[in-house]
Image (cartoon, coloured by chain):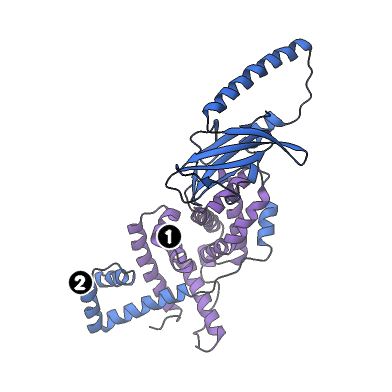
Chain colours: A purple, B blue
Amino acid sequence: MQSEEYSIIKQCMDGNAEIYAILVERYKNMVYNIAYRMLGDTEAANDIAQESFISAYVALKDFKRGAKFSSWLCSITINKCRDYLRSRKDNIPIDEIAETTIFKIPTPEDTVYKRQIGQGLQTALNELPEDYREVIVLKYIEWLDYKEMENILGVNVNALKVRTYRGRELLKELLKERGIIDE
Amino acid sequence: MNKDVDIIHRLLDGELSEEEKRDILSKIDSDPVLKNELKEIEKTIHIAKNSDRLIAPASFTSDVMRRLPARKESYVKEVRDFFFKGRVLRWNMATALAVACLMIIVFAGIFQFQKKNNLVQYANTTSGESTITVRINFHAPEAKKVAIAGDFNKWKVDENILKRQDNGIWTIEIPLKPGAYNYMFVVDGKVWMTDPNAELYQDDGFGFKNSVLKVTKL
């Protein structure tokens, strides 16, 4: 872990709460993106991302020196997303969760096309089983390597590779269904 | 997932041996279904990797900071306050004499201890305020840089850099007001180390020990 971040955490533990803003500024987009890609909803993503930072702050005393703060924070965010998705499944019928946007076959012209691909990707991600969605988000949206994913998800590298292969195979089929990838 | 598709995924992750790679590439070359499978998986990865990154709302950091719960005062601060916070004491002459005797014994003990320790303290007066200059030594012959971070410099890792002596001992002199200070050494800018010769140690809340330096009036 970077010395500077360890120094910041020590100061937070010593009662200097204001300095935590440095870590929030540094990682807010990463946490917000993970939450958005996992939940597919900007409002929920904002809430969950904020709660992740607050939980991390409360749990700073459990942070192990030598660990990487960003990985630890990712792990908290993923757990928050899982809890949120579980509570949402309890409250909303399944057919209301999936397919929130109607897609047209894209015409490769301008940013509308790019936006449609982005929306198509998100809808496909929403339909992926959670454990596949987690590996796809961490590996391809956040560009993390398997070793770091192992630290975040607590699943060994070999199992993560198999999960990633299956996840992208399924994602490919979902993108094909939406015409994002040509048959 | 059939075997060939599985091999294509491993190919894309750079997991195949040269021989396996040659085999699957020649298979792909002669099989339009496999060729298409490879193209589609590559496109899937491309779309995911090149998706837009969202920017958190402008008020995100201030919203988080506003919602942070008040932290219970740290153990370190509680201990510090216990020893150094101002108190009103009721006293009588007998108690005062007993305390005076005790202090003489304690100071004599500290003096003996400091002679054995690697700390050297001497008093000086700077801009009307009394401070004690403390010399701290740390043995680290392999280190390229050693800094000290602690309560006295807000745990900054680049404010107090030790100077290397010929014998692998790193030294620094720091003027400090009387009090107790938690500190650690930071070797080569990344490794945090507890002082093996510290007077006292205190749990740092991360499963390690801070060294504690007590600076007393001379």
> Which quadrant of the view contains residue B20?
bottom left
**Left-right relation of A46 to B33:** right
Can residue B18 be spotted in the picture? yes
Q: Is residue B83 above or below residue A61?
A: above
On the image, the x and y values in percent for residue A18 come to 68, 51
Query: A87 or A26: nearer the eye?
Result: A26
> Which quadrant of the view contains residue A166?
bottom left
Residue at mark 1: A131
Q: CA distance from mark 2 to mark 1?
A: 32 Å
Can residue B73 be spotted in the picture? no
Mark identifier at residue B72: none
Chain containing mark 2: B
What secondary structure is marked by label 2?
A: helix
Q: Residue at x 75, y 15 (%)?
A: B96
Could you classify mark 1 by the number of other residues whose Cα lies within 10 Å: few (under 14), some (14-19), or many (20 or more)? Answer: some
Q: Residue at x 62, y 57 (%)?
A: A22
Chain containing mark 1: A
Mark identifier at residue B19: 2
Q: Residue at x 68, y 58 (%)?
A: B63
What secondary structure is marked by label 1?
A: helix
On the image, the x and y values in percent for residue A25 come to 62, 60
Which amino acid type is marked by label 2?
Answer: Glu
Which amino acid type is marked by label 1?
Answer: Asp
Q: Quadrant of the C terminus of chain A?
A: bottom left
**Left-right relation of B30 to A53:** left
- In the displayed image of the protein, which residue is found farthest to the top? B94
